[in-house]
Image: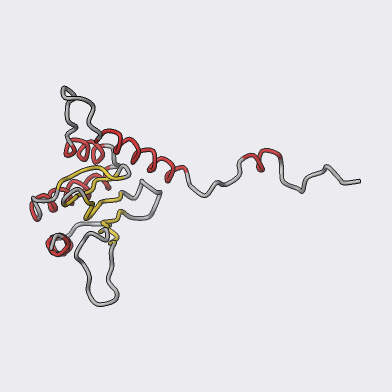
């Protein structure tokens, strides 16, 4: 006869099975679905979303330290590459060229990490040999860091 007893795990632990995504990742996916839904045309009289307003709203939701970094990164990207379109991407401020994300700002609070990140997608023209960084940790924006970001953005848009 087979035993019906379970191992030392409680029934609630078994019910709270890990499905592969953290709460933060699930939230980011839901935000991305909303972003895609918002860009679909909804008739001739529907108001077009203002992507820059969405980016600024996301920045305003950040903690003080992340918000200060994001505001400065936003200003740097807009000044350095005005051809990039600000938009949200998985709930993060991002900047696109021809509809494709080139770079994005990820706040430390987004995935409960130690530092904010400035990342570049594969659309960015950062290729340098066979190995190059595509994301940078941000803890503070000094004049040197701002100059480096401006150079990376210039290079990214090619």
User: Residue at left 23%, top 27%?
Assistant: 42
The total number of labels drawn is: 0
Q: Where is residue 101 in the image (x, y as percent from the top left)?
A: 23, 52
Query: At x 55% / y 46%, what residue is drawn?
Result: 19
Is residue 120 shown left or right of residue 109? left
Quadrant of the rendered structure where residue 24 is?
A: top left
In the orientation shown, which residue stands out farthest toward the front?
43
Looking at the image, the residue that sits furthest to the right is 1
Question: In which quadrant will I find the C terminus?
Answer: bottom left
Q: Nearer the viewer, residue 145 or 79?
A: 79
Query: In the rendered image of this protein, does residue 73 appear above or below residue 63?
Result: below
Task: Tell me where residue 15 appears, x and y as whole percent.
Answer: 64, 39
Of all residues shown, which one is farthest toward the top? 45
What percent of the width, then of the height, locates residue 89?
28, 45
- Between 117 and 27, the one lying in front of the other is 27
Observer-nearest residue: 38 or 72?
38
On the image, the x and y values in percent for residue 68 come to 21, 47
* Above-or-below relation of 12 to 152: above
Query: Residue, x 16% and y 50% (percent of image)?
Result: 98
Question: Which residue appears at 34% of the width and 50% of the height?
Answer: 108
Q: How is the image coloured?
A: secondary structure
């Amino acid at each position: 006869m087979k035993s019906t007893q379970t191992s030392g795990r409680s029934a609630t632990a078994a019910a709270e099975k890990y499905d592969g995504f953290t709460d933060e990742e699930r939230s980011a996916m839901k935000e991305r679905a909303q972003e895609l839904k918002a860009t679909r045309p909804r008739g001739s009289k529907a108001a077009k979303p203002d992507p820059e307003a969405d980016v600024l709203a996301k920045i305003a939701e950040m903690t003080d330290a992340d918000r200060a970094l994001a505001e400065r990164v936003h200003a740097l990207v807009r000044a350095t590459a005005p051809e990039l379109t600000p938009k949200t991407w998985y709930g993060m401020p991002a900047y696109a060229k021809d509809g494709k994300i080139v770079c994005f700002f990820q706040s430390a609070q987004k995935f409960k990490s130690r530092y904010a990140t400035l990342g570049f997608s594969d659309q960015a023209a950062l290729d340098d040999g066979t190995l190059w960084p595509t994301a940078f940790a941000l803890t503070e924006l000094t004049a040197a860091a701002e100059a480096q970001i401006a150079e990376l953005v210039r290079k990214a848009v090619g």
